[in-house]
């Protein structure tokens, strides 16, 4: 897989504003994702987390600028961008009846010429990814017949088959039980360390954010309310103010843990 350049920023977001259906969802958002780090965006419902990832990934129009590896996304053709950025959305579109291997092969689309077919090298990439994610035995199985955790690994496999150095994960553990959540998150963290990936993710689970992310960005009402190390962002005062929640923040093994407290 490709690896991010050492040092510097993978992503630079400056003054990004997004309006949807006449409503401003993001307003003047700035953030940096450093090469090789895991940056997680948190915030209450409607804060604009998924919208931000879609803007960075090129799925939404915006004003402001997004720069990836020193190049403005406005100057990147779709195929070139797909070689730099891979996305796992909350609800990926899965063609009916598609089997795992063919679905993962879709990740090689940026490398296949128009009207061409996949090469032996493309197939080799897919097979390596399937093996790495322990999906080889499911290669010929329809995605609809996989468990939640297996299907999430397949979604991740398609993104990894793109060999892009920037991975966007929008709520990657939604609807997974705690065992499958940990399985997916540990796998992403392992791949990040081994392959030099930069991870930009969103999550509603604040304890997961504190445990896995190097840095956090807290969005509230479409603006950056706080940014920094997990211990700087996951504070009882900030969470009470922006989530309207009563919580206790406790030390965890790798970062702060957020526990709700009954009123």
Image (spheres, rainbow, N blue to C red):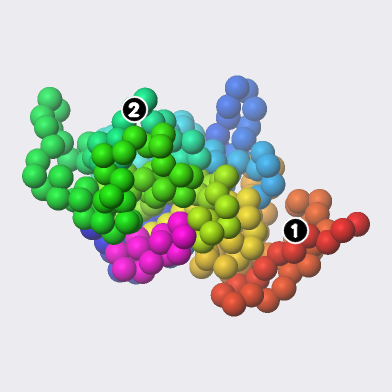
Which is nearer the N-term, disc 2 or disc 1? Answer: 2
Q: Quadrant of residue 196?
A: bottom left
Q: In this view, does 40 lie to the left or right of 98?
A: right
Q: Is residue 163 left or right of residue 41?
A: left
For the point 13% across and 37% down, which residue is it? 118
Q: Quadrant of residue 88?
A: top left
Q: Does the magenta stretch include residue 166?
A: no
| View extreme (top): residue | 21
Q: Decide which of 263, 236 is in the foreground and name it.
A: 263
Neighbour tally class for label 1: few under 14, some 14-19, many 20 plus, Cα within 10 Å = many
Q: In which quarter of the image is the N terminus?
A: bottom left
Q: Picture coordinates of residue 200 (x, y %)?
A: 46, 54
In the depicted structure, whether residue 61 falls above or below residue 219:
above
| View extreme (right): residue | 263
Neighbour tally class for label 2: few under 14, some 14-19, many 20 plus, Cα within 10 Å = few
In the depicted structure, whether residue 210 falls above or below residue 131:
below
Q: Is residue 186 magenta?
A: yes
Question: Residue 97 has which mark?
Answer: 2
Q: Quadrant of the C terminus?
A: bottom right
For the point 38% across and 66% down, which residue is it? 190
Q: Name the residue under label 1.
A: 239
For the point 36% across and 53% down, which residue is it? 166
Q: Picture coordinates of residue 121 (x, y %)?
A: 11, 48
Helix, strand or loop at label 1? It is: helix
Residues drawn in magenta: 183-197
Q: Picture coordinates of residue 240 (x, y %)?
A: 80, 57
Helix, strand or loop at label 2? It is: loop
Q: Quadrant of residue 47?
A: top right
Determine if residue 229 is in view. yes
């Amino acid at each position: 897989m490709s690896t991010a350049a050492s040092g510097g920023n993978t992503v630079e977001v400056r003054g990004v504003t997004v309006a949807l259906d006449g409503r401003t969802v993001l307003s003047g958002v700035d953030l940096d994702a450093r090469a090789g780090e895991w940056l997680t965006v948190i915030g209450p419902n409607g804060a604009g987390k998924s919208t931000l990832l879609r803007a960075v990934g090129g799925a939404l129009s915006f004003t402001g600028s997004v720069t990836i590896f020193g190049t403005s996304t406005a100057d990147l053709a779709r195929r070139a961008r797909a070689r730099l950025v891979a996305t796992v959305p909350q609800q990926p579109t899965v063609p009916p009846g598609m089997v795992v291997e063919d679905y993962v092969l879709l990740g090689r689309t940026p490398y296949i010429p128009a009207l061409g077919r996949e090469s032996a090298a493309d197939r080799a990439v897919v097979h390596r990814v399937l093996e790495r994610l322990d999906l080889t035995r499911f290669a010929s199985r329809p995605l609809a017949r996989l468990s939640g955790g297996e299907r999430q690994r397949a979604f991740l496999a398609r993104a990894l088959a793109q060999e892009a150095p920037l991975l966007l994960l929008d709520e990657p553990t939604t609807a997974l039980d705690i065992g499958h959540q940990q399985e997916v998150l540990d796998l992403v963290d392992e791949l990040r360390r081994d392959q030099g990936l930069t991870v930009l993710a969103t999550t509603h689970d604040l304890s997961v954010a504190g445990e896995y992310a190097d840095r956090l960005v807290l969005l509230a009402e479409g603006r950056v309310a706080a940014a920094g190390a997990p211990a700087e962002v996951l504070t009882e005062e900030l969470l009470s103010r922006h989530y309207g929640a009563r919580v206790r923040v406790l030390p965890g093994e790798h970062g702060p843990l957020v526990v709700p407290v009954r009123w």
